[in-house]
Structures are given as structure tokens and as C-alpha cells.
Amino acid sequence: MAAEQQQFYLLLGNLLSPENGARKQAEETYETIPGPSKITFLLQAIRNGAVAEEARQMAAVLLRRLLSSAFEEVYPSLPVDLQTAIRSELLLAIQVESQSSMRKKICDIVAELARNLIDDDGNNQWPEALKFLFDSVSSQDDGLREAALHIFWNFPGIFGNQQQHYLEVVKRMLVQCMQEQNHPVIRTLSARAAGAFVLANEHNIPLLKHFSDLLPGLLQSVNESCYQNDDSVLKSLVEIADTVPKFLRPHLEATLQLSLKLFADRSLSNMQRQLAMEVIVTLSETAAAMLRKHTSIVAQAIPQMLAMMVDLEDDDDWSNADELEDDDFDSNAVAGESALDRMACGLGGKIVLPMIKEHIMQMLQNPDWKYRHAGLMALSAIGEGCHQQMEGILNEMVNFVLLFLQDPHPRVRYAACNAIGQMATDFAPAFQKKFHEKVIASLLQTMEDQANPRVQAHAAAALINFTEDCPKSLLIPYLDNLVNHLHSIMVVKLQELIQKGTKLVLEQVVTSIASVADTAEEKFVPYYDLFMPSLKHIVENAVQKELRLLRGKTIECISLIGLAVGKEKFMQDASDVMQLLLKTQTDFSDLEDDDPQISYMISAWARMCKILGKEFQQYLPVVMGPLMKTASIKPEVALLDTQDMEGMGEDDGWEFVNLGDQQSFGIKTAGLEEKATACQMLVCYAKELKEGFADYTEQVVKLMVPLLKFYFHDGVRVAAAESMPLLLECARVRGPEYLTQMWHFMCDALIKGIGTEPDSDVLSELMHSLAKCIEVMGDGCINNEHFEELGGILKSKLEEHFKNQELRQVKRQDEDYDEQVEESLQDEDDNDVYILTKVSDVLHSIFSSYKEKILLWFEQLLPLFVNLICPNRPWPDRQWGLCIFDDVIEHCSPSSFKYAEYFLRPLLQSICDSSPEVRQAAAYGIGVMAQFGGDNYRPFCTEALPLLVGVIQAAESKTKENINATENCISAVGKIMKFRPDCINVEEVLPHWLSWLPLHEDKEEAVHTYNFLCDLIESNNPIVLGPNNSNLPKIFSIIADGGVHESIKNEEVCGKRLANVIRQVQASGVLFTECVSQLNAAQQKALQDLLSTA
């Protein structure tokens, strides 16, 4: 054993070797040692004082990692006496260890082991560790007191289900240690431990209240430790502000005053000042209403943030830099700007804009360029948060900012471009409508600044933002001027690329051209030949590594121009472009994974697919390989504890989510955006190519179904959800058996995804996808087990809907409730209602596929829908509740009548509801009741008629907000006359009904109405035709209006019937001329179109 132990010491030495080969070999050898042996060897190394310090520390780290990542595999299988020995050894090791950093590492092992020795019921199976904690914390030995606090900080849940019992002891221990006069280290450690304990109990409100008197001591420790160059307690305070802001409420003023003091103290490091600022900024996001009561602090913090933004370096090479370095997120200027942006979004413009406006105005008049730059960047930063308030002063702001495009300093001109670009995005499209003339002229002029390429490029970037959201009609008058400017700059910059190798401006100009073409669409055709040869030239020749981005952007530009001008114009170059793309594609295997061309290529292929349509199918064999490879990227992930994380910064592409208990989940984000784009492009192919994509459905569905659970990126899950019904459509051509197999592969994952999806936007996509799949597959596609699961999920979604409404009512009673809180509650409400619409979509598809067979299953949800249509519910609840019952009547009659007692009264009462959306849902229900309901519903059709007429004849029934409800009422009256004529006096109602036509807002109901009109005309109904056909001009006008408003599809049955009516009158000559002469020009054209196409 001793020899093996010696071997192990050598191995530890090699694990620390600076030589890569030796280290890698040692790692491989270490992995082969069985777990139990590892524990023994590592523990020996830790205890052996003769071993080199570095190797002992390495052994401690390895043992902690082993317990963290593989506890279940190694520890429980050890003999009980060995387990006991390990536990005793570790506690003893802490007591005898003289090196403080080594003692900390052993404490980390103890905390890790204790964490794993709390069973599922919360019993701590290591009582000796608790005794050790209590003995050590009251010991005279400072090293042991530090050790106890370190263990408690690392694992604040160590008391398990005994926590309540020990609460007073814990509190007293922390208070005593925080007041320890002679030992700053113990004061700091106890403050960190207190912070960790509060965070570990974030949901235990009574405990948080009980511990709130620890906060003054915690704040004192924040202050002290910062001046000892230790920001660990300040970081705890940021975490508390983020996770449990309410804990700070009793001492919020003191917390804010301290943060402000540290933030303003320039003797501290930038990092510490930014952390102190982060406390205030985080509270503006997590406890905005609470912070809005302390506006004086906010008013003092804003100038400090602005002062940070002035912290810029003079850099003589700035103007000509050809590579854009990423923002330095540690710099004060970037941190200040980000803080302003977040604070404006968190607190709202009502508070922030009045506080900041004067400061910005003063900065913009400062002779020092840094202040003018900071003022303009601040203006860009607050646009999103102060949106509403800035709209009122947009005019003066834009005029003012445009002046700075003439500023003598290039970096101020750059910042002015930035502000214009940001406002073009934040205030679109109002910004474009108001300022198009000034902004386009000023940006084009700034793009002529040949001496300062950075400014030129940023003016082009601002122009991209402007055109992306610019209504086409506004851009057209400037096209000539825009295109000529862009073309002349492109020519100059191509020369510069060849002569000097500079490309920054060219990259942006190419994207500007793409953006203009994208907005101008077919109006770009005259300029196509001006650009296409040069763009093709760039793709052919820009093959060097440093030109990858330029080449990618040019590929994007070509494909966007192709999409804009359309197939006919683009076809002359299509095969050239395809060959160029194919060439890049075949070199694809040589491209590095982070090559920017990849994502541009993937998007360009999808645009080519849209342009070429079915002709694109021939290229799929070349395109699909790289696309599937990118869509299959697996991100690097890791579960890390706090110590491991210290070596990994976010700057090397890792992002972390704190899981509590000193553990974090890390993910390397490189490639995630590309993966999402690739998945979206697969959706595009399926949508565009339909059965042409059938051969690829199997590999794509195998990729996409697991991605419904890809929680690292919402966009990937959305694409996976969207793809499901489209892939089924593509696969139809391969026959019912293949289709059913594919559906079975999807179905379970799709339903489970709906049950577990945390993000509401993705959830709505998943539900929409399920509804579409059920429509494609039809009756019998869901088995009993899945129905049961789906019923449970829908039930929980509806229960959650009611619970959320109650929670919002509680928040309205909160002491911090104000109008901004109400705005965010309204947003939450809208979100909930959107999910409700998707529940409705799923049920609609089930009812329309399964008919009355599904009613028994539906009964479990019935009470919840009955609750939705109670008169005291908000109108969206009643609207969507009625829509469900409309579906029950439409698809499950006559069986639906057995539920009539639950919905009939509310349905009839809702015809006259004050909300137009509810009236519309009720009127639609009456229409389907007449059409499908059966005899049981007859008396209710009679009862509904006067209510419907009342709505139609009301004074404001045709206003924009009322028209849809009114048209549904008119259609319902028509359906009662058509399907239930015995319920009412048709002769009396018919003339009124005719006078209410045409319908043109609700296209579906318009078709029902026109079909009924055809029935009446074809049967020569005397009331409709009038004496001596005197109503024909009116009928012509109704039909022509249907054409004008596109309510009639000429190629469909209804259109053909209406055309026949017109042709019959046309045969009579004079009467036809008379009818047509009473129509206006648009109506006459619509009639001609109908006759020529139907």
C-alpha cells in the first residue's frame, strides 16, 4: 500500500506539471483509479505534512470534486467503518492543519460531504459535523472559528430539518461573530455566512424577517471589507438584492446610502465601485416599486453613472481601427452605460428622464469631447426605458443630436450616429415617419467622412437601423439618392480593400445595401445591375481569413437582393450565385467552427430556397450536410461549485446560472446562435419545399424532437416546435404508415414539453404546434394515455391561470403598489391570456377531429371553463371560455345539449356584453347553434334574435372596435334564417338583413353570408329581388364590395356562384348596364375581376 501511495504522490506532482503531455497522461491515469481507492489516497495526501504544499492542495481540490460529482458512485459502497473513519479524519485534519489556505480547502470537503449526507427527509446523517461546528465557533482558537464559519457559508443548509430548532443559536452565533472587535477576518466571514444563509432561505418569509436585524452588521462588514480590498461581502449584498430584495426593506435607506458612498469613492477599485452600483441597479430591476420611494438616492446615483461614462482613454489610432474589438465590459464607460439602460427600464421614464435630462444637456455643451460622447451614449441608453416620456420631446432631441454629426471630434460624431441608430430602433416607425428627410440626408453626409472610417462605418450602421424599420412608401422617394451614395462609397472602399486591405466600412456598406433592398423590395429592380457584379466579385475573391466576415455579409446581401427583386430578375444570376455558394459549401469542411460565414451561408441558402421554390430541391444533397451539422452542435456544459468558477470568467464564452448551495451551472455559449439559426432554416425548408423535403424528414425529426427539451436556447425550442406540423405535411407523400410512425415519434415529447416548458413564449409555440399536428393527423391520433396526460396538463394550466389572477390581486394590495407595478401586472395578464388562447387552439383541434367522442374526456375540464364564463371574470376569460363552448356546440352537437345548463344562459347574456370581443364569441355561438345544434336549441334561437338585432342596430355598431362583433351578429341572423327558418318570421327579418350587408371585416362569416345570399337569389326570393327586380342594384353593390374588400375569393365556390348571378343579369342587357352604372370605379373593377376569374 505504501508503494502505491508513493506512486500516487508522483501522480499528483504530474497533475500539476506545466508540461501538457505529462499532465494529460497523469489525468488519464488518475481517471482509471477506482473511486474508493481515490478517496483513501487523496485523504492520505491531505494528512501528510511531508508532501509538497501544492500537491496537498491539489489532493484537497480533487477530493472535493470527487464528492461533488460522483458521491453516489463512490461513498455509499465503502464499508461503514471506513465511512466513519473518513468523517473523523476530515474533522481532525481541520483541527491539526496549520496552513490557513489548506484548512479552507479541507473545510470545503467537509461542506461537500455534509451536503451529500442530508437524506431525502432532511436528516443530517453526520451529527458529529454539527457538534464540531458549535464547538469550533465558540472556541478560543481563531483558526477553528474561521473554519466553522467557512463550512456554514459553503453549506448553509447543514442543519437540515433541525434548522428551526437551532435558529436562535445560529442567529446568536452570527451576531457575536459579526461584532468580533479584534478579528476582521471573522467579521467578514460571518457576514458572508449570514448572506449565504439568507439566500438559502429565500422563500422562508418569517425567517427573513427574524434575521433582518443582522443587516446593519452585514452593511458595516461590506464597508469595512471593501477598504481591505475584499469585495466578497459586497458580492453577497448584490446577490441578496437580486434574489431576496425584500430582506433589505427594513434598512433600505442605509443599504442605498452605503452603495452610493462606495460607488462614488474613487479611491476604491473600478470593480468595487461597479459592484456597489450594481446593488442599486439590481434593486431597480428586482424591487423597482420599493426603490421608487427613495428617489433622492436614484437622483444622486445617475450623475455618478454618467461620470463613469466619461472615463474614456484618448486613442490616436481609434478612427482608423479596422477590427472592431468587443466592448470591454469591465470598463467604467461600458458599465455606466449598461447601468443607465437597465435602471431606465427598471424604474421607468417617469422617474429617470426628469432626473437625467438636465445632466445630459450640460454634458453635451461641455468643451471636453468625453462629456459630449458620454451624453450622447446616455441618450442612446435610456431610449428603451424612457420610451413613453421621450416620445413627447423627440423632435427637439433629434434636431439636437443631428447637430453632433458635425462635431469637431470624430468619437462624438460616432456617438451621435449611435444615438440616431438607437432611436431609429426604439421609436420605430414614428421616428422614420417624422424625421426621414433630415436623418437620411445627415447620415449620408456623415458617410462621406473618408478621414474617419470608424465614423463612416457607424453612420452606415445607423442607416441600417433606420431602413430596417422604415415603411417602404417613405423610403422610395430617397432610393435614387441612397443607392447612388452607397454605390459610390462601395466603389471607393473596394479600391481601398485592394490597396490597403481595409474592410470595416465596406462590411457595413454591404449590409446597408442589403437593408435598403430588403425594405424597397421590387422597387430595387432598377438598381440590381449596378450592384450585383461587384458583390459577386467580392464573394469570388475575398477568400483570405481576415475577410471572412465581409464575405459572409456579401453573401447575405446577394440573397436579400435576390429575395427583394424576385425570381424573374434574379434568375439571370441565380446559377452563378448558386455555384459560388456551392463552392463555399464544398470548402465548408475546411471552415473553422467559429467561422462567421457559416451562419450567413445557412441563412442565404434558405433565402435561395424562398426565391427558387421547388427548383431548390436539387441543391438539398449539398446543403443539408453542413446545415444538420450546425443544427446538431452540442454545447459544452459543466456543473461547478463556487471555487471552480473562480478560474473561469464569463469573458471566455461561459455563462453561469446560480443554482444555490454554492453551485452553478455553466454553459459555453459559442455556437448556440448558429444552432438556433440552422434549426430555423430547417423549418424554412420544410415550409417552402413541402413534399420536396420528404426524403429528409426522418433525419430532421430525429434531430428536432430531442431539441424540444433544449433549455439552453429558447429559439432552438421554438424552431423544434414549429417544425413538427410542417414535417408531418412534408411526410404525407410517403403514405399513412410512415406518417403515423413519425407522429408517434413526436407526440409524447410534444405533450411532455407542454407540461414542463418554463418560458411562456415557447410554451405558446408548443401548444400551437400540437394543435396543428392534431389537425394534420385527425381522429384517433392521440391514445388514451396521452389524452390523460394532456388533460392533466391543460387542467393545471387553467388552474395556474386563476391562481395568477389571485396573486396579481394580492400584489395590488402591497405597500409598494404603484402605477408602474400595475403596468407590469397588465403585461403578466396579457401573457396569461395568450396562453389561454393556445389552450383554446388545442381544444379546437381536438373537438374538430374527435367530435362528440371526446366529450367524456372534456368533462374533467368542464368546471374550469364554466368558471371562465362567470359574469365576474375579466372579459378575456369570458371571451375564450365562450369560444370553447362554441366549439362544443359546433363539433359535438346534438350531444352538446347535455351541457347546455352550464353555458346557455351566459351565452345569451353575453350577446349584449359591454366588451365587443365577448359579444363576438357569443354571436358566433348562436350562429353555430342554429347551424349544427339540433332541435333542442330551437327556442334559444328564437330568444337570441331580438338580442342580435339590438346589437346590430345600436348607434356605434359599425365603429372599428365594434364591427367584428356586429358582423358576427349579422351572420348569426342569416344562419338562423337559413337553418332554423321555423323559429322566426323570415319575411319580416329578411329586408333588414339585406340592408345590413355587406360584411367585409370577418372574412369567414362573409362567405357564409354570401352563400346564403346566393341561395336566396337562385331561388328567386321575391323579398330579396324586390318588385320588378328593383333590389338588383343594391345586390350588385353588395357583391362588388365583397371584391373590393377581398371578402370573396374568386376561385372558390362562393365566388363562382356570385359570378353566375352577375352573368344571368348580364344576359338581360339594359338591367345590367343600369346596375353597373350605379357602382363607383373600384366596385366596377372588382366586378370585372370577378367575371374574368371566377
Image (cartoon, rainbow, N blue to C red):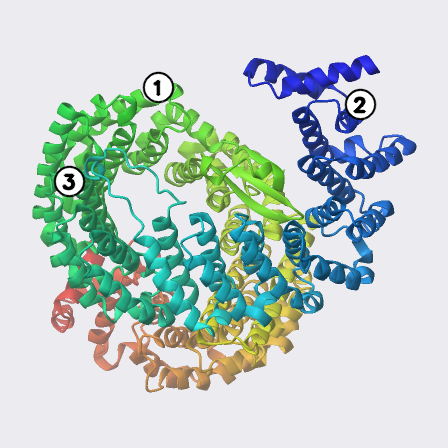
- Left or right placement of residue 146 versus residue 597 in this view: right
Image quadrant in which you'd find residue 748: top right
Q: Residue at x 59, y 42 (%)?
A: 665
Q: Which residue is mark 2?
A: 37
Element marked by disc 3 = loop
Relative to residue 855, is residue 906 depicted above or below? below
Q: Dot 1: within a 10 Å radius of its alpha carbon, few (fewer than 14), some, or many (20 or more) residues?
A: few
- Of 499 and 1019, which appears nearest the observer? 499
Q: What is the C-alpha distance between the residues marked 1 and 3?
A: 38 Å
Label 1 vs 2, first from the N-terminus = 2
Instruction: Name the spot of residue 822 as percent of width and height, x first.
Output: 47, 73
Q: Are marks 1 and 3 in contact (CB under 8 Å)?
A: no
Instruction: Name the spot of residue 848 as percent of width and height, x first.
Output: 54, 57
- Left or right placement of residue 570 versus residue 14 in this view: left
The residue mark sitting in front, 1 or 3, is 3
Is residue 851 visible to the viewer in this orientation of the structure? no
Q: Residue at x 61, y 51 (%)?
A: 756
Label 3 vs 2, first from the N-terminus = 2
Q: Which residue is mark 1?
A: 586
Q: Which residue is mark 3?
A: 452
Q: Three-letter amino acid code at disc 1?
A: Thr
- Of 217 and 83, which appears nearest the observer? 217
Relative to residue 936, is residue 204 depicted above or below? above
- Of 704 and 172, which appears nearest the observer? 172
Is residue 636 visible to the viewer in this orientation of the structure? yes
Q: Three-letter amino acid code at disc 2?
A: Ser
Instruction: Name the spot of residue 501 as percent of width and height, x first.
Output: 19, 25
